[in-house]
Amino acid sequence: MMRGARVAIVGGLALTAIAAAIVLSGSPQVLAGSNGVAAVIYPPLASVSGGGGACQPDETVPAGSSAIRLSLEASAGPRIAVTVHSGATLIAHGESAPGWLGRVVTVPIEPIDSTVHQATVCFSFTGADERVSLLGVRTPRQGAATSGARTLPGRIAIEYLHAGSSSWWSLASEVARRLGLGRAWAGTWVAVMVAALMAAGLALASWLILREAR
Amino acid sequence: MRSMPLAAWICALVACLNAASWSLITPPFQAPDEQAHFAYVEQLARNGRLPTSSTQEFAPDEQLAFEDLDVAGVSLQPQHHTIASEAQQRKLEGDMARVAAASSISDKGAAGVAASQPPLYYTLEVIPYAVGAGGGVLDQLALMRLLSALMCGVTVLFVFLFVREALPAAPRAWTVAGLGAAFMPALASICGAVNPDAMLCALSAAIFYCFARAFKSGLTPRVAVAIGVLTAAGLLTKLNFLGLVPGVVLGLALLARRTAQELGPRAGVRAAASAFAIAALPACVYVLANLISHHHALGIAGGVIGFTVSHRSISGELSYIWQLYLPRLPGMRVDFADISPPRDLWFNGFVGDYGFEDTFFPRWVDNLALIPALAIAALAGRELCLRRRELTRRAAELATYLTLTVGLLVLVGASAYLSFPSEAAAFPEPRYLLPLIPLFGGVLALAARGAGGRWSTAAGVLIVVLFFAHDLVSQLQVIARYYG
């Protein structure tokens, strides 16, 4: 029984370590560009219930973009479908998972080869009664987003993301430095302490499991 | 009273360490409503009285910390990270030192969304607040978070003890339940913040333990008083505790009936009456004090409750609450057109919903998590099937746990219905179900046993490792969100 517990601990932790190493070898999504529009919360450009959508012209979608971040607000947001058109040509499309909340929703799209100017980004969603607020800034009618036949009072904040070139491993020291800022006793010791606390918890748990398995 | 096993203490210690780690990785005031909870404590500590306003006009030192940390700019906007430069840090430190040295700080008695909550948790938090007073807001917040982390340890201690009473023949499974709860990131993240949910979980776990013990060994006067005291403390900790009250009442009634059958009617009535009297005492004093001072009988919470009961149709509300947790039945109005609340809100929320409700895993992680979740559910179901005769024998006990659960679910659903339909699900956050964590521990213990024979040890170990791994990647996700 003791041997079985030991094998399960070692095997489980080895799998965890491998999974963590793979994830940390990947790159975070970073900002490729944005339309420079601020996401003003109050008042929103529009609040839409029961399904809807909008299209926004004059967008520049940077090369390599693999996700579009729309400034929408909802408490349990519906699935959002996004399309990117250049003229009448569909450049990219994607769909978010439902149930998102907060003030942005990130929609993955197939990576775009080259920068697209004068693109039109459209999104749509279906829903029952829940409200989705569109966040952005007020602008003149020309260039404003549209929702069906209606011209919205401004433009929606949109950001374009792509996979960064640096792995999480290479960013580790910078992340540790930032983790130590903005708190009571600032310093990189915070990152060390977090690692120590987790290691202590794991060691205690492993010891307890092996003790119980005797 | 049985002695406390070393394993229970170890599980509690692991929970404290884990919550302390979460308290370090979560940026100040980026936990749910932490600004309001801090403001409540500040009110109590400085003025010795409860908050008088639910506006967001917090004290100047807290506001200054918000500005220097760009709290509003970071929360709910994953594209914005926490402060990153030494210059920002120096300004923060300078401002905090300056405000901490100020002799008097005016405020308007506001505590935001926390203002309507009862004061017990906040009163306890006054102690670390006072200890850290010399260092300013951030020192105080760090110490207050550590008190919440201690409550995480208490929660896990009682989860362990609950499972020990509920499943006495499975000692190894107690440890699986304890360590599983200790590494549960949803619990640790909320216990790493200033939030009364931390204390609510501890009290709820203690009540579950008391009921498990009473159903096993009888409702002794000592256990009855403990249930009464814990209920009173729960009512003084967070309004959500009201959801557990029907279960407490039912449990006491069933236990009193059983005690009456075994020891005579007087013994049963006496034990239950003492629990009810103690539980009701603080609420009666609170109502009396409000009436004497010509306020609403339920104080600032009265407005909330009044709005709740007068809001909309009962049938619509029941339909909404049903759909919030279960698949829609034929004939019900469609309240959630494009989302499945059990999956998208609750399951995915427990997989990962951190920070200011703005840090999640990618969808594929939620999908992947279905595999171990279903495996655990299947193993626990198998064990329950094997022990179905015991379930029948323990029907009264199970009815109590079921009523505790349903009461809380209905309360959360009714609160969410207040903002519906303008917001589909404004209130249902997974943390509100954490008071049911003893049952979750029970499921883990059943799953470990359900593997059967020689596999049960390996299954138990793998469950613990799974929760550790979940906790680890959850912390990495939060670190990436705020500092990446």
Image (cartoon, coloured by chain):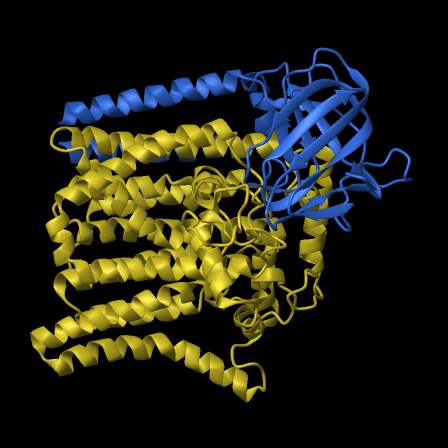
Chain colours: A blue, B yellow
Identified at 45% across, 44% down, the residue is B346
Quick one: quadrant of the C terminus of chain B?
top right
Is residue B6 or residue B109 the one in the foreground? B109
Above or below — where is B11 with respect to A58? below
Identified at 59% across, 31% down, the residue is A96
**Could you tell me how many numbered marks the image carries?**
0
Give the x, y percent position of residue B272. 23, 76
- Left or right: B418 in relation to B187: right
Quick one: quadrant of the N terminus of chain B?
bottom left
Q: Quadrant of residue A105?
A: top right
Above or below — where is B255 with respect to B349? below
- Left or right: B376 in relation to B240: left
Is residue B226 or residue B165 the one in the foreground? B165
- Left or right: B281 in relation to B439: right
Above or below — where is B316 with respect to B147? below
Is residue A82 or residue B289 the one in the foreground? A82
Identified at 70% across, 63% down, the residue is B103
Q: Quadrant of residue B296?
A: bottom right
Above or below — where is B353 with respect to B97? above
Q: Can residue B370 be seen in this snapshot?
A: yes
Q: Quadrant of residue B418?
A: bottom right
Give the x, y percent position of residue B356. 58, 45
- Left or right: A154 in relation to B434: right
Give the x, y percent position of residue A180. 59, 34
Q: Can residue B82 be seen in this snapshot?
A: no
Give the x, y percent position of residue B44. 57, 68
Identified at 50% across, 49% down, the residue is B429
Looking at this rendering, what residue extends furthest in the top direction? A113
Is residue B120 or residue A69 the one in the foreground? A69
